[in-house]
Amino acid sequence: MAETNKPLLIKRYASRRLYNTETSDYVTLDDIAEFIRDGREVQIIDLKSGDDLTRQYLLQIIAEHESRGESVLPINVLNDLVRSYTSQATSVVPEFLAASFEMLQKGQSQMMENMSKANPLATMPGMDAMRAQQEAFMKAMTGGMGGMSTVPGATQGAEGDGDSDGDEDLDEIKKQLAELQQKLSKMDK
């Protein structure tokens, strides 16, 4: 497999077809969006002129998602972006947006890490399924912007040791749940 820390080079031919140089086949905008959701950087170059068209195509992907009702950008943010092109604020906006998305990604990663660290519920049956749902939700909310990996420390469920001490187990689970709720309430403050 190709080195994934290098951008995937896509060449645009005069016919406007997009060619994946790693797999030697033509791709669509949806394919490119999927590469990006999977965490891959892409670079789109015009074959004839050598111009970098990446920004143009990324904006086109965003516009298509927005037009299909998959709105991520609120109207007021879109209005502010349009205003930033006509004001002196253009020098600040790109850095602000990049920093905001970086903070969002770090926050998501930290939240997922906190859910797995010292989490007494991580060994309970069904927790892996719940964790997977949460990861899918976070990925869907961010459009797969990266910064998220599988949560370390979660196991495939509790293996019973054959004891018939169901009441003791239930009491222990209740205690662990109460401790987890305390930790979560401290995180909110």
Image (cartoon, rainbow, N blue to C red):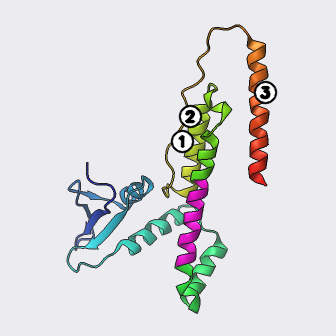
Q: Quadrant of the C terminus?
A: bottom right
Q: Residue furthest front?
A: 118
Is residue 39 positioned above or below 154 on the image?
Answer: below
- Mark 2 touching mark 1, by CB under 8 A? yes
Tell me which numbered mark, 3 or 1, is placed earlier along the sequence: 1
| Residue linked to disc 3 | 174
Disc 3/disc 2 C-alpha distance (Å) = 19 Å
Residue type (three-letter) at the residue carrying disc 1: Val
SS at badge 2: loop
- Residue 24 placement, left or right of 52: left
Region in magenta? 95-108
SS at badge 1: loop
In the image, 151 versus 79, the foreground residue is 151
Tell me which numbered mark, 3 or 2, is placed earlier along the sequence: 2
Q: Is residue 39 visible?
A: yes
Place of residue 106 in the rendered image (x, y in percent of width and height, measured from the top left) = 57, 58
SS at badge 3: helix
Q: Residue at x 55, y 29 (%)?
A: 155
Disc 2/disc 1 C-alpha distance (Å) = 7 Å
Residue type (three-letter) at the residue carrying disc 3: Lys
Q: Is residue 87 visible?
A: no
Tell me which corner region of the image, top left, top right, bottom left or bottom right, holds residue 28: bottom left
| Residue linked to disc 2 | 154
| Residue linked to disc 1 | 151
83 falls in the magenta region: no
